[in-house]
Amino acid sequence: MPAYPGESVDDIASALSALPSGTPVSEVARRLLDLFTSGAVAPGTRLPPERQLSATLGVGRSAVREALAALEILGIVDVRPGSGTYLRGLASELLPQTLRWGLLIGERNTAQLLELREGLEIYVARLAAARADAAVIARLDDDVKRMRQTVGDLPAFAKADLDFHHALAEAAGNETLTDHVHVIRSLLQVYADRAVHDSAEAERAVAEHEAVLAGVRRGDGDAAASAMAVHMATATARLLADSRE
């Protein structure tokens, strides 16, 4: 696979420039992101190795490695052990700016991301109620049952919870919306993985998801959106508390 459209990894490296001494990882990631979303590098392209990027940017290999790891979490690159790092395709023109802004996540940005997530998830629930077919409703029902069965196993519970939201987003039938929700979840994953702390909170979350599902099952967009608003309010409160610890 070519490393750059018709050229070599040296051309990618030459498109970058050295950063000031002491540049943080977040800035290294932003510099790489600027190039990757400029349109100059084709999706599927193999990128220069860490050592070459490190030399070009004038930063340590660990900074490049951490920056690429952050971009991998966000779905920008695909790191394949033994093969290299490849640029992935982007589904929306708006997505790169959303990602760029989110790379500098901190307490203030966490609150803003959570606020944005609330609005998107509520809209997803409303669309899903209008568009979900029998197969999707069956998936959602299965996810809620798995949540109910795993209230004492929080990692398994979190997986069932995430599957529910993924299925709901797919049912909404709007790929750009789904992309943005996925990005926000990825940026918040460090908190989302521990959003439910005990079985009592898990039981409450199950009831909230059941209410969303009931609205979707009836095709009632208002009910589904209202139930999701309740769920987002409690989930956001927990995540904000975690982000300040």
Image: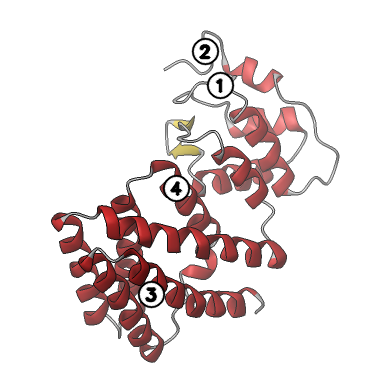
Can you name the residue that lies furthest to the right here? 21
| Residue depth check, mark 2 versus mark 4: number of the one nearer the observer | 4
* Identity of the residue drawn at 61% across and 48% down: 66
Query: What percent of the width, then of the height, locates residue 64?
Result: 65, 41
Q: Which residue is mark 1?
A: 41
Q: Which residue is mark 3?
A: 227
User: Considering only order in the chain, which callout, 3 or 1, is on the residue closer to the N terminus?
Assistant: 1
Question: Does the residue at mark 1 contact the one at mark 3 (Cβ under 8 Å)?
Answer: no
Rendered position, 183 above or below 30: below
The one of 47 and 91 positioned closer to us in this rendering? 91
The one of 49 and 195 positioned closer to us in this rendering? 195
Q: Secondary structure at mark 2?
A: loop
Tell me how far mark 2 sits from mark 4, CA to CA. 30 Å
* Identity of the residue drawn at 18% across and 68% down: 142
Identify the amino acid type marked 4.
Answer: Leu
Q: Secondary structure at mark 4?
A: helix
Question: Does the residue at mark 1 contact the one at mark 2 (Cβ under 8 Å)?
Answer: yes
Disc 3 packing (10 Å; few <14; some 14–19; many ≥20): many
Identify the amino acid type marked 3.
Answer: Ala
Identify the amino acid type marked 1.
Answer: Val
Q: Which residue is mark 4?
A: 177
Q: Which residue is mark 2?
A: 5
User: Considering only order in the chain, which callout, 2 or 1, is on the residue closer to the N terminus?
Assistant: 2
Disc 1 packing (10 Å; few <14; some 14–19; many ≥20): some
Tell me how far mark 1 sits from mark 2, CA to CA. 7 Å
